Amino acid sequence: MTYRFTTIIHREGRWYVAHCAELGVVSQGKNIEEAKKNLKEAIKLYLEDEPRAKRYSLKSAPLVTTIELEYA
C-alpha cells in the first residue's frame, strides 16, 4: 500500500528537520535529501508500531497554507 504524507522541512542550525504533518513523526538530516530519507524510515517504524495509523486516509490530509502578519 502506498501512503502520501505532507512533509515540512526547515533548517535548524546545521541540520534539516523533517516533520510529517499527519502523524507528528519527526526526523532530521545533514541535508534535505537525508532528512527526507530519515523521515521515511521513521514513518515506516511508526506504522509498524501503531496499527491505527495504517487506516490513514487522504481525506484527513491537513490544509497547508500561509499567512501574512504585520509586526512592528
Image: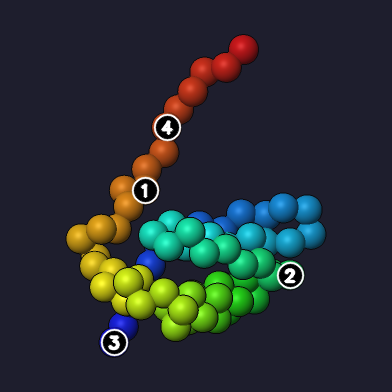
Q: Between tags 1 and 3, which lies in front?
A: 3
- State the image coordinates of residue 62 (x, y, percent, origin top left): 32, 52
Dot 4 amino acid type:
Ile
Dot 1 amino acid type:
Val
Q: Circle 1 is placed at which residue position?
A: 64
- Tell whether label 4 touches label 3 (CB within 8 Å): no
- State the image coordinates of residue 7 (x, y, percent, origin top left): 46, 62
Q: Circle 4 is placed at which residue position?
A: 67
In the picture as drawn, the residue positioned furthest to the bottom comes out as 1
Distance in Å between CA atoms under marks 1 and 2: 25 Å
Mark 3: which secondary structure?
Answer: loop
Q: Is residue 12 above or below residue 45?
A: above
Residue at 53% in and 60% down: 19
Mark 1: which secondary structure?
Answer: loop
Q: Is residue 16 left or right of residue 58?
A: right
Q: Earlier in the sequence, mark 4 or mark 2?
A: 2
Query: Is residue 8 or residue 52 the one in the foreground?
Result: 52
Q: Earlier in the sequence, mark 2 or mark 3?
A: 3
Dot 3 amino acid type:
Met
Q: Which mark is residue 30?
A: 2
Residue 61 lies in quadrant: bottom left
Q: Earlier in the sequence, mark 1 or mark 2?
A: 2
